[in-house]
Image: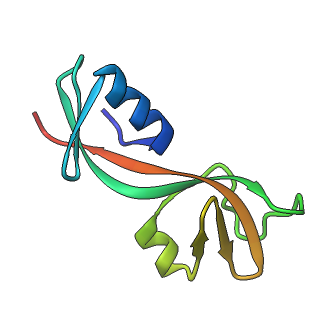
């Protein structure tokens, strides 16, 4: 199973529905019995005020460590990289743990 991006909203919904449980940085999908190591991340969905994406980030998911390394700054649902602002969805990258 490959890694996956899960938005904060989806994770909250899954937890409420009993489809996922969280313990520290570990999420378990209850129906599948699969566990994932969760790391904070963002999904880039739109360039704010432009169609130009000079950093080639649209559609990509980056961890918060990646953002820091590239000099990106997170402000709520926005990230600024160099001189470009992006709308993002906050969430997590889930790396599957061995069974």
Q: Position of residue 80 (x, y in %)?
A: 68, 74
On the image, the x and y values in percent for residue 59 come to: 65, 49
Q: 49 or 61: nearer the eye?
A: 49
Q: Can the viewer see residue 7 in this picture?
A: no
Q: Residue at x 44, y 67 (%)?
A: 64
Q: Is residue 97 above or below residue 76?
A: above
Residue at the left extreme? 99
Residue 15, position in %: x, y? 32, 30
User: Is 93 positioned to the left or the right of 49 in the image?
Assistant: left
Q: Residue lying farthest front?
A: 16
Q: Is residue 24 visible?
A: yes
Q: Residue at x 40, y 36 (%)?
A: 12
Looking at the picture, does residue 71 appear above or below residue 14? below
Q: Is residue 21 above or below residue 48?
A: above
Image quadrant occupied by the C terminus: top left
Q: Nearer the viewer, residue 20 or 58?
A: 20
**Residue 22 falls left or right of residue 17:** left
Q: Quadrant of residue 17?
A: top left
Q: What colour-coding does the image apply?
A: rainbow
Q: Residue furthest right?
A: 50
Tell me: 18 left or right of 62.
left
Report the label total. Answer: 0
Residue sitting at 63 percent across and 58 percent down? 77
Q: Quadrant of the N terminus?
A: top left
């Amino acid at each position: 199973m490959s890694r996956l991006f899960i938005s904060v909203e989806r994770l909250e919904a899954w937890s409420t529905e009993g489809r996922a449980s969280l313990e520290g940085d570990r999420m378990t999908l209850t129906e599948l019995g699969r566990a994932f190591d969760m790391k904070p991340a963002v999904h880039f969905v739109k360039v704010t005020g432009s169609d130009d994406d000079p950093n080639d980030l649209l559609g990509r998911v980056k961890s918060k460590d990646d953002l820091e390394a590239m000099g990106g700054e997170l402000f709520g649902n926005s990230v600024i990289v160099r001189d470009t602002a992006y709308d993002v969805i906050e969430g997590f990258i889930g790396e599957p743990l061995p069974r």
